[in-house]
Amino acid sequence: PLLGMAGSIAFFAVLFSLADPNMDGYEQFRKCHGNCVNGVLHAIGMPLAVSGVFLIIRAVSDSPEFTRTLQFLVVTRYLYLYLQYEPDPYSPWLFYIMYMGLFDRGLYEYIYCDPKWTRLKYLGVGISLVF
């Protein structure tokens, strides 16, 4: 579990170190997701994939508290990045409230702390949500 925790922290540290928020890239993202189909797919797919990553972290760390703390830090850090390039002042906060509601109220209370789930089940479900 300690190795899983260290690996999880390292994964997000590397991921955020690679982040380079710029308006050109964000405008291209917005243009791509501006049509209804891409926007809906992104709105459904991203929370599922991110939930899968946190389920994998729950499996490798074997700690619901560690996973909850890490997801809070990651989502809050993403909010900070999002606020840098999103012109709409409400979108980043709506994202944050939605994700924290999903992760903290849904995943933590009903899945991370469920004693019937095994580490292998967390890993399998997490991988299936990512892909």
Image: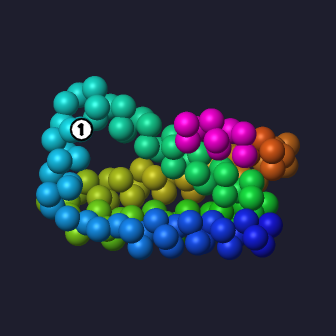
Camera-side residue: 120 or 98? 120
Dominant SS of magenta comes to helix
What's under tag 1, amino acid-wise? His
Helix, strand or loop under label 1: loop
Q: Is residue 75 magenta?
A: no
Q: Quadrant of the N terminus?
A: bottom right
| Residue 54 falls in image quadrant | bottom right
Q: In the image, is 19 to the left or to the right of 31?
A: right
On the image, the x and y values in percent for residue 25 come to: 20, 55
Q: Residue at x 45, y 52 (%)?
A: 99
Q: In the image, is 101 to the left or to the right of 60?
A: left
Q: Residue at x 78, y 72 (%)?
A: 2
Residue 124, relative to residue 114: is it above or below? Answer: above
Q: Quadrant of the C terminus?
A: top right
In the picture of the structure, the residue carrying the numbered disc 1 is 33
Residue 10, relative to residue 90: is it above or below? Answer: below
Q: Residues within 10 Å of mark 1 (few under 14, many from 20)?
A: some
Q: Residue furthest top?
A: 37
Q: In the image, is 128 to the left or to the right of 20?
A: right
Camera-side residue: 8 or 46? 8
On the image, the x and y values in percent for residue 118 come to: 84, 46
The answer to whether residue 89 is seen in the rendering is: no
Magenta-tinted stretch:
123-131
Q: Residue at x 67, y 51 (%)?
A: 56
Q: Is residue 129 magenta?
A: yes
Residue 16, relative to residue 99: is it above or below? Answer: below
| Residue 11 falls in image quadrant | bottom right
Asked which colour scheme the image uses, the reply is: rainbow
On the image, the x and y values in percent for residue 128 come to: 62, 36
On the image, the x and y values in percent for residue 109 come to: 68, 52
